[in-house]
Amino acid sequence: MAGRASRRVARWGHLRPVGERGKVLWLRCGDDPWQLRLAVDLTRALRAKRYDVRLVLSYEAEYPELLKPLDDCRNTGWGYSPCDHPRALRRAWARLRPYGILQIGAGARAHWQARLAAESRVLWIDCPQAVPGQRRYPANELQTADCADCAPPADLLTRLVGAQVDTQFRSAVLGVRTAELWWMHAPTPELLTGWRELFPDDVLFVSGATPGAYARRLSAWDRAALPAGAVVWADETRWWPALAASARAIYLGAVERPLLWQAMAGGAPVAVAPGSRLPRADLADLVPASAATPLLQAWRAYAADAALCRAAGDRLRRRFWQERRDAEAVGEELLERVFNW
């Protein structure tokens, strides 16, 4: 109804692979941008592994900037997924004739799941649900429930986290003065007030909030040193790696898996809001849940003791790299399995 004809056509199954020859491998993800990042990364990896197949990537929401890495992939097409309607799926299957399917991130609705259950070559990657008996690549222990054919749990999103970042960002923010940089994601008003009282000489970055609450937007920053007590809204996710590498400590009022892994990769102490659900059970010993007052007290201790701060951050960084190494191994096994199809 908005005049987006290509989306309407795709939703009703009018898909076609790029190229004239070769088996079709179909990668499908949901509407989350990080799912799409993972799907794009796997598409590029498959293209590098196999030159004889045609690749199709479909999704539920389009992020053009995330699709740019596919521009140089030959015999690769992408667009919206067909809707969960029998007629649309019959048409899509008839036109694509997929040899193998990789279901990434999103669970499949009823008609999709019935279609996938009838296929012999389906991989479920980081999916909350899957067809019993088909190969799964779980991101955590919960996704291994009732699974007879599972890879070891490993979060493939860690492969996309910027782990080696130049810390020039910190120097640019603080200039020549001695101060600290802190990062809060989705903080409460109580936390913001408490930070202003205890750290008047430092700089605070806030993400996961609306821009109207803050005087500065990071995307409009002119690279000049920021004044003491500045509160800046980090309004784009591309700043996450630099913030994680530069912050003295990090607080996550809302836990998002990619954000948590990015914070851990930066090597700073990380705390979360009480009641937060962590992606892996063993992280509870490394990432404490903290209310406002204990959190700010811990931050004062980190500001006063660089060794204490570094020790806490190093434990998180080591755990991140353990997860990343596991993800690399699982990712290689996944690609080898598809190669052997």
Image: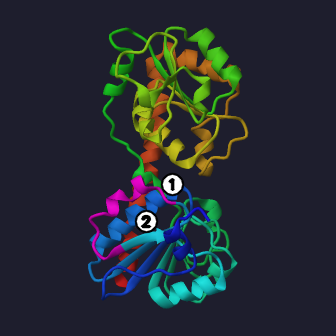
Given this view, does label 1 or label 2 mark the residue nearer the observer? 1
Q: Position of residue 155 (x, y in %)?
A: 50, 57
Q: Is residue 155 above or below residue 209?
A: below
Whether residue 36 sits left or right of residue 214 in the image: it is left
What range is drawn magenta here?
62-76
> Circle 1 is placed at which residue position?
33
How far apart are the two marked residues, 1 and 2, measured between alpha carbons?
22 Å
Numbered marks: total: 2
Front residue (pair 248, 60): 60
Q: Quadrant of the C terminus?
A: bottom left
The verdict on residue 74 being magenta is yes
Q: Position of residue 196 (x, y in %)?
A: 60, 13
Q: Position of residue 320 (x, y in %)?
A: 46, 46
The residue carrying pointer 1 sits among few (fewer than 14), some (14 to 19) or many (20 or more) residues within 10 Å by Cα, namely: some
Confirm whether residue 268 shows in the render.
yes
Q: Quadrant of the N terminus?
A: bottom right
Confirm whether residue 329 shows in the render.
no
The residue carrying pointer 2 sits among few (fewer than 14), some (14 to 19) or many (20 or more) residues within 10 Å by Cα, namely: many
> Circle 2 is placed at which residue position?
330
* Amino acid at the residue labelled 2: Val
Q: Residue at x 31, y 26 (%)?
A: 168
Q: Is residue 219 above or below residue 36?
A: above
* Amino acid at the residue labelled 1: Pro
User: Does label 1 or label 2 sit earlier along the sequence?
Assistant: 1
Whether residue 37 sits left or right of residue 282 in the image: it is left
Q: Is residue 12 above or below residue 38?
A: below
Q: Residue at x 57, y 74 (%)?
A: 11
Q: Residue at x 66, y 22 (%)?
A: 191
